[in-house]
Image (spheres, grey):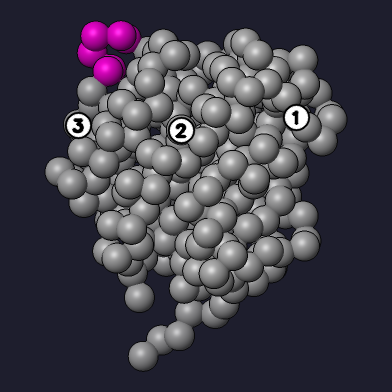
């Protein structure tokens, strides 16, 4: 069984809108080819702290990334660190805050836009800094990295849903349309990724309020979807709400590497034991 993982974090995609507008992915759930979970995000429900949660499995009180203003390298071991330590390749197409957390802070717009350095935690990266950088470009940046470097761990992070949500609110036509656009973009690539044996996880850092913000404790701001396409996961809709801290150790499990000491132990609902032949 493959140990390659693709993670797509659709920034700012709340559970109810994401779970109803991801058409092809929902088709896979409906036909028992994928699973859908509801994840409760950590607090604060802000981007930079939750990038750190998703990638290190540690809460803000432990990792020190307590707001979007915390421009500093992470003090924790991320999935990027762990893949590198285990001799695996990694790559990402992401917002520049991800580079600031794991490779260098502050971000240098010229030198850090494209990164290829296998001595760094993030070995291959394409980073953008405009919040309205097209999701189509980000996703195809990632696909180009996949084809060039064949990473075991590919992390894809488009920002358009968050940008539109903050401008128009979660109940707007524009917000739903942006999620539909991302769903359409992913539908072009998912059949290839599935046929090549990747474990694929599609989730978000945080949700979005009706008034176009996030950071608080409401369900709209905290509840996000997690779609998983993997032979290791029982397909269909899962009722149990998953804590966001369980995401990073699950990715480690699918990669076939040990989680960090700081990551929680959690019996992920629907996870099958790997069969060793």
> Which residue in the rendered view is the most extreme toward the right?
218
Mark 2 or 3: in front is: 2
- At a point 20% along the width and 31% down the height, the residue shown is 116
Pointer 1 or 3: first along the chain: 3
Q: Nearer the viewer, residue 5 or 211?
A: 211
Pointer 2 or 3: first along the chain: 3
- At a point 47% along the width and 67% down the height, the residue shown is 230
Q: CA distance from mark 1 to mark 2?
A: 21 Å
Q: Is residue 109 magenta?
A: yes
Pointer 1 or 2: first along the chain: 2
SS category of the residue bearing label 2: helix
Quadrant (top left/top right/bottom left/bottom right) for the C terminus: bottom left
Label 1 Cα crowd, 10 Å radius (few <14 / some 14-19 / many 20+): many
Q: Position of residue 152 (x, y in %)?
A: 31, 55
Q: Is residue 140 visible?
A: yes
> Which residue in the rendered view is the most extreme toward the front?
173
Residue under label 3: 116
Please provide the residue range marked out in magenta.
108-113
- At a point 38% along the width and 39% down the height, the residue shown is 185
Q: Is residue 45 visible?
A: no
Q: CA distance from mark 2 to mark 3?
A: 29 Å
Mark 1 or 2: in front is: 2
Residue under label 2: 181
Q: Nearer the viewer, residue 193 or 99?
A: 193
Residue under label 1: 221
């Amino acid at each position: 069984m493959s140990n390659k993982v693709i993670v797509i974090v659709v920034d700012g995609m709340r559970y109810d809108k994401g779970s109803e507008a991801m058409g092809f992915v929902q088709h896979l759930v409906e036909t028992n080819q994928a699973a859908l979970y509801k994840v409760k995000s950590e607090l604060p429900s802000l981007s930079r702290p939750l990038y750190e949660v998703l990638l290190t499995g540690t809460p803000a009180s432990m990792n020190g990334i307590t707001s979007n203003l915390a421009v500093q390298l992470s003090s924790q071991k991320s999935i990027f660190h762990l893949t590198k330590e285990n001799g695996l390749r990694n790559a990402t197409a992401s917002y520049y805050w991800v580079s600031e957390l794991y490779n260098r802070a502050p971000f240098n717009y010229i030198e850090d836009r494209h990164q290829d350095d296998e001595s760094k935690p993030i070995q291959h990266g394409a980073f953008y800094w405009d919040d309205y950088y097209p999701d189509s470009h980000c996703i195809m940046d990632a696909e180009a990295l996949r084809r060039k470097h064949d990473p075991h761990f590919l992390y894809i992070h488009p920002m358009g849903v968050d940008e539109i949500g903050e401008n128009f609110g979660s109940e707007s036509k524009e917000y739903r349309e942006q999620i539909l656009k991302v769903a359409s973009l992913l539908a072009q690539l998912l059949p290839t990724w599935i046929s090549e044996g990747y474990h694929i996880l599609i989730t978000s850092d945080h949700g979005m309020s009706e008034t176009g913000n996030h950071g608080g404790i409401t369900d709209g701001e905290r509840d996000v979807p997690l779609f998983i396409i993997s032979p290791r996961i029982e397909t269909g809709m899962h009722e149990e709400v998953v804590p966001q801290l369980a995401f990073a150790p699950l990715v480690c499990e699918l990669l076939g590497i040990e989680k960090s000491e700081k990551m929680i132990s959690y019996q992920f609902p629907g996870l099958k034991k790997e069969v060793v032949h």
